[in-house]
Amino acid sequence: MRVAISSCLLGAPVRYDGGSKPISEVIELAQKVEVVRVCPETASGLPVPRPPAEQREGRVYLSDGRDVTREFDLGARRCLDALGRSPVSLAVLKAKSPSCGVGLVYDGTYSGRLVPGRGVFAARLEEEGVCVVTEDTVKSCKPSVEHPVAIVLGSGLGHLGSLVRPVRRIDYRDIEGFPMSAKPVEGHRFEATVGTIDDVPVVVYPGRIHLYQGYSAAEVTALVRHAHHLGCRDIVFACATGAVPGQAHVGLGILTDQINLTGRNPLAEWDGLRDVESPFVDMNDAYSPYLRTLARGVADDLGIAVEEGVYAGVLGPCFETPAEVAALRTLGVSYVGMSTVCEVIMARALDMNVLGLTLAANESGATGVSHESVLEAAGRHAEDFERLVRGVLRLL
Ligand code: HPA
């Protein structure tokens, strides 16, 4: 996987004042991918050191008043041209800068204040379809013993749990809010394992409960709140789905977005919203673009066939009628399943980084689909699924 990374984040003394900003998490990532070092400001020909630059009303000025918009455009174009020969899907750029900032940039008062906006180079990369993040995203996704990666596994995918080197096990009945009486359906086990996979700290939940079993949205999201309590910042949801014909094929998929058709929402039902700052949760980029891009890169590098698409969560437990399949296609849905949507809402309310992976076990609306056939299809793709998850964990 090729990743463009700001040279200053890797320790090069290229910042306006002649300094650098080495970030250990970014340097670690750089050791595991093919790196293209970028610095649009040095590419612009501007001298180092120089006065700081900031954006104001769509232009870029040095603090001595000189308009350097042309130089910043030129630097961005030169870096893009250099990348054009070797396309990247991901760029990790220095936060807040007038060339590289994502989401927030300095406000033009040279006082350290920030305003919503994008750097000149970051904007060009995004227009080219590159996922652009800052060092803050890489840092916030970095697992550690304090911040293990939570992995919630669906029907037939529980085998991944056997890869964990266990440190301790947690009976789901000891998890607050998880219904004491819940019994796992076939293919699920109700015991979380805290430990490591390939030395990456994880907490694996090898099974879940569903709305269609009569549980509330609050109950089906108890595992997410538990993961958050344990310190998890990243959470991987894996679920079995049906692939909507014409939109996706049977096999592995990366979820890009969701439509909640369950009619339930854990933020409306749960009376213990104490961990949630506000129930009015922003659901843009609910599935982390950074984690999705890593997953795509791993799949491409390992030759694993993976599609991408929108997930629709339905209440179930019956499968879809032909009219429902047609409606889902019209809605732009690729994958339909009976889990995950409420969990993703809860995870986002708790500001967790979400990766959604699916095994489309059958075509939605196909005849002869049963729980057994879903488990059987999951078994056929289990090895690729495990390679994909391990590859993503390695990059985090
Ligand atoms: N529809 C909904 N959920 C599913 C399906 C399906 O076809 N297959 C596995 N989970």
Image (tube, rainbow, N blue to C red):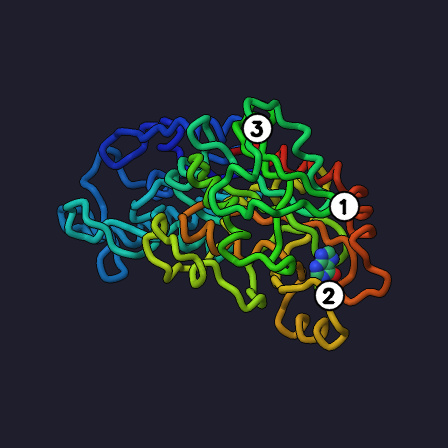
What residue does disc 1 label?
378
- Residue identifier under label 2: 318
Distance from mark 3 CB to nearest ligand 1 atom below 8 Å = no
For the N terminus, give its image quadrant: top right
Q: Which amino acid type is marked by label 2?
A: Cys
First in residue order: circle 2 vs circle 1: 2
- Asked if one can make out residue 382 in the rendered structure from this viewpoint, the answer is yes
Compare residues 266 and 18 and report the one nearer the observer. 266
Q: At label 3, which amino acid type do we have? A: Arg
Neighbourhood count class around disc 3 (C-alpha, 10 Å): few under 14, some 14–19, many 20 upward: few
Query: Where ligand 1 lies, by quadrant?
Result: bottom right
| Residue extending furthest toward the right | 368
Q: Amino acid at mark 1?
A: Ala
State which quadrant residue 333 falls in.
Answer: bottom right
Label 2, label 1: how far apart the Cα atoms are: 19 Å
Disc 3 to disc 1, C-alpha distance? 25 Å
Residue in view at x 52 percent, y 38 percent: 3
- Secondary structure under tag 1 reads helix
Q: Residue at x 43, y 57 (%)?
A: 270
Task: For the residues labelled 3 and 2, say whether their Cβ atoms are less than 8 Å apart.
Answer: no
